[in-house]
Amino acid sequence: MGLLGLGTLVQAVVIGRATVPSLDAVRFARTARTAVEQGPLHVIRWEAEQPLFPLWVAAVHETMAWHGGEFPSIWAASTQVAAAIPLVLTVVPIYFLLLRLFNLRIALVGAGLFCVLPEVRRLGADGISDSTHLFFLTVALWTTVEYWTARARTATGRIGRETAWLALAGFFTGLAVLVRAEAVILPIALLLTISLEQVALAGLPGKSAAAILRSLGLVVDRSMRVFRAAAGPLAIHVCGAALVLVPYLAMAGAGTPQAAVARVLGRAAPTASETKTAGKHLAWQTPEGRPLHFAVKEGSIRQRGLAAALGQYGKELAAMFSYGAGALALWALWRHCRELTRPADRFLQGFFLVFSVAVIGFVAREGY
């Protein structure tokens, strides 16, 4: 309760000092207003934006309007409150995640630092979807760590409590995907961890020629072992995510695999025939009703390339941890580095690696 109180106090101060939300909040407020006027199904069907945060903003707006009536800045306030609530709640899974990995003292210090980190605490005042995505993704990470812990305790290998944890992780991963597509990295990290675990259990071949030839003959067998070991957990995780994503894709009218992937990745856009059906309610269209596209400018000031992406990624990490807090976190990791060899630790290390590669690749291609 103390951590929740600290998070609430920090968000109240930050939002109170913020004059206006960020520019991106205008887009979410517009989509949320469409949800209020046209209904949630209209937003799910016709908007390319991932729907969960705008629908959450619309729900917050309706609650605020019912309680205090309409006022000029209600939409700006709705985006900020909608962003602040999950940001405050994120401290709960962070606390339990650190408690599972380390101890009570580190859990309290780490969760407290999360509440006051500059790059984190501003998310509520910005009124954007990052905080909602962070909440669902953190819950998914925590429940996945609980799966690895329960799996280590289940010596018999039978289906037990770990199955429920993994299905829950998939469910929250699905919710996170409906806010931002980056959450698809989590099942990739899960697959990577299981595969490396099976490779480690199989052992490395010797250095002799005969041993190398024998190892080549066992490639197919080991590949099948990895597949069998990963198929069950991935299937459970995907089933949990399907509880969220399948109804969403059905309501969005994504009837083909290509359309479903585009929707999940947030790359979907209405077709020409759908544009005519949507009519004047479809945003981002020309007066003639054609979709509006933005081409990359020749004289763009965006920095692209691997070197620029690596530099920007390092700057963002340093800014996020506010240097001092980052140094404290690195010192704690260095002290406990010899202990971080459990499957749950390997999973989080794999997630960070895959996430970093994805971010650097995206920034190198798209620019920043």
Image (cartoon, rainbow, N blue to C red):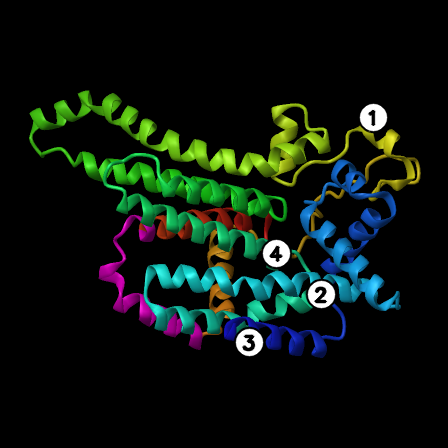
How far apart marks 4 and 2 lie (CA) works out to 11 Å
Q: Is residue 178 magenta?
A: no
Q: Residue at x 88, y 41 (%)?
A: 281
Dot 2 alpha-carbon crowd within 10 angstroms: few under 14, some 14 to 19, many 20 or more = many
Answer above or below: position of 173 versus 256: below
Q: Quadrant of residue 212?
A: top left
Q: Tag 4, which secondary structure?
A: helix
Percent position of residue 189, x then y? 41, 43
Q: Quadrant of residue 154?
A: top left
Pointer 1 residue: 273
For the residue pair 189 and 44, the one nearer the viewer reads as: 44
Q: Tag 2, which secondary structure?
A: helix
Indicate the amino acid at tag 2: Gln
Q: Which residues are magenta?
A: 324-345
Q: Which mark is residue 6?
A: 3
Pointer 4 residue: 132
Question: For the residues carrying marks 4 and 3, which lies nearer the camera in this image?
Answer: 3
For the residue pair 193 and 5, the one nearer the viewer reads as: 5
Answer above or below: position of 47 versus 66: above
Q: Earlier in the sequence, mark 4 or mark 2?
A: 2
How far apart marks 3 and 2 lie (CA) works out to 18 Å
Question: For the residues carrying marks 3 and 2, which lies nearer the camera in this image?
Answer: 3
Dot 1 alpha-carbon crowd within 10 angstroms: few under 14, some 14 to 19, many 20 or more = few
How far apart marks 1 and 4 lie (CA) works out to 33 Å
Percent position of residue 98, x then y? 39, 63
